[in-house]
Amino acid sequence: RIVELRVDEGETVQRGDTLLIIDRTAFQAAVQRARAQLSSARASAAQAKANLDQARRNVRRTRQLKEQ
């Protein structure tokens, strides 16, 4: 959503001029949601790796017991 329009139609502008101000609330909320999702995905990946490591240890232990 546009909060403020800083130029009029037909007005000459220069590179770097601020043309308008937007409401950043929605964008900031989206960034926060994305960060939370990323954090959750990283935690899930870490848990999956821990589960895989445990499963590999279990397979090794089972093979060793089977060979005895």
Image (spheres, rainbow, N blue to C red):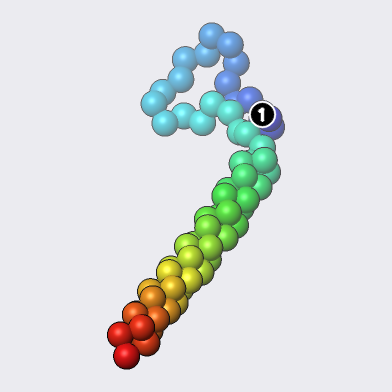
At a point 61% along the width and 33% down the height, the residue shown is 21
Figure quadrant of the C terminus: bottom left
Image quadrant assignment for residue 66:
bottom left
At a point 48% along the width and 65% down the height, the residue shown is 48
Which residue lies under the disc numbered 1? 2
Q: Secondary structure at mark 1?
A: strand
**Label 1: few (<14), some or many (≥20) within 10 Å?**
few
Q: Amino acid at mark 1?
A: Ile
* Relative side of 52 to 8, left or right: left
Image quadrant assignment for residue 67:
bottom left
Residue in front for this viewpoint, 2 or 17 = 2
Is residue 57 visible in the rendered image? The answer is: no
Residue in front for this viewpoint, 61 or 48 = 61
Callout count? 1
Check the image and name the residue furthest to the bottom. 68
Figure quadrant of the N terminus: top right
Across and down, in percent, residue 11 comes to: 52, 13
Across and down, in percent, residue 47 comes to: 51, 69
Query: Vertically, is 68 above or below 17?
Result: below
Across and down, in percent, residue 30 comes to: 62, 45
Across and down, in percent, residue 34 comes to: 57, 50
Query: Vertically, is 66 above or below 49?
Result: below
At a point 57% along the width and 60% down the height, the residue shown is 40
Query: Vertically, is 7 above or below 53?
Result: above
Residue in front for this viewpoint, 45 or 7 = 45
Check the image and name the residue furthest to the left. 67
* Relative side of 52 to 68, left or right: right
Residue in front for this viewpoint, 49 or 24 = 49
Image quadrant assignment for residue 2:
top right
Is residue 40 visible in the rendered image? The answer is: yes
